Amino acid sequence: MRIDALLLTFAAAFASINAQAQAPAPIVVKFSHVVASDTPKGKAAQRFKELAEAATKGRVRVEIYPNSQLYKDKEELEALQLGAVQMLAPSLAKFGPLGVREFEVFDLPYIFPSKDALYRVTEGPIGRDLLKKLGAKGITGLAFWDNGFKVMSANRPLRVPADFKGLKMRIQPSKVLDVQMRALGANPQALAFGDVYQALQAGVVDGTENPPSNFYTQKMHEVQRHLTVSNHGYLGYAVIVNRKFWEGLPGGIRSDLERAMKEATAYANAIAQKENDDAIDAVRKSGRTSIYYLSDQEKAEWRKVLAPIQKDMEGRIGRDLIAAVNREAAAAGK
Ligand code: LMR
């Protein structure tokens, strides 16, 4: 190599090392969640990471920790408040223990007759007001991500409410879900999501409820012989961040992340239904769990037992909020 070419190579290498030394360290967003990567939430988290890192040209690095790898349900909320992680997407049934009971409106049986009704709430003023309530807890709510309507499972067929009698059913830590299981004649037991498979396997609980995507990706079909497509209730997420962290971000970065979140939210909501339909097919193909669809008469029996919970929970959730959600549902049509 000629001497001037050699000098040029040295100069370029030096400039690159110098630039690296001067580039600010990336802002790290640790995004912890409790489900598998190949679920609606797992995939949307990954999409957010890609969009956020591209939009900020690498100034933000999003690290995803799926499957309760870092924290289980309760601990992840504590970790977020302490700033040990920056972003989570807990299910809406997990905000009661934090003191934000209004989120339990989403757990009320049959409150959403359709996804249209749901989106009118999550994408409208009711959703915005709900997210604002998290501010007092040091949390900023960014978005709602859909998962889907829930199925019930156990090792015996669940066709009518009488079939639940005496079953120990795993629930998320929501008073509404506790009341729901009791109304069906079951004994509810709140457990962290990461413990459900083992609890079912060991017989600590007999059954559970979740959208099919969670059921299948946690391999619950290996330990549950019967699944009923009951669609009796809803499960979705609030994507939340540590408020101090969020407000401390440079303005340009924050708006890049807001745009990335908007796109990731549209993606989450677009894939949720298909992911759950595919999961039901996968459970069927496994041959381990028989899948049952309720007849119209059986649906009516479930409704008769579960519908009064809306009224019973007015004191806890707020009568006006329940009425406002029901108005949106009516406006969406059945
Ligand atoms: C559960 O705990 O059953 C689910 O909410 C887990 C999740 O985040 O989807």
Image (cartoon, grey):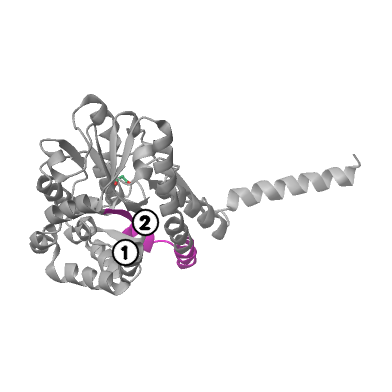
Please tell me which residue lies in front, 235 or 128. Answer: 235
In this picture, residue 55 sits left or right of residue 153: right
Q: Closer to the N terminus: mark 1 or mark 2? A: 1
Cβ–Cβ under 8 Å for marks 1 and 2: yes
Q: Residues within 10 Å of mark 2 (few under 14, many from 20)?
A: many
Q: Which residues are magenta?
A: 234-260
Residue 190's mark? Answer: none
- The residue depicted at 51 percent of the width and 56 percent of the height is 52
- The residue positioned 27% from the left and 62% from the top of the image is 112
Q: What residue type is disc 1 on?
A: Leu
Q: Residue furthest right?
A: 2
Q: Quadrant of ligand 1?
A: top left
- Considering only vertical position in the picture, is 193 above or below 332? above
> Regarding mark 2 in the picture, which secondary structure is present there?
strand
Residue annotated with mark 1: 118
- The numbered dot on residue 146 is 2
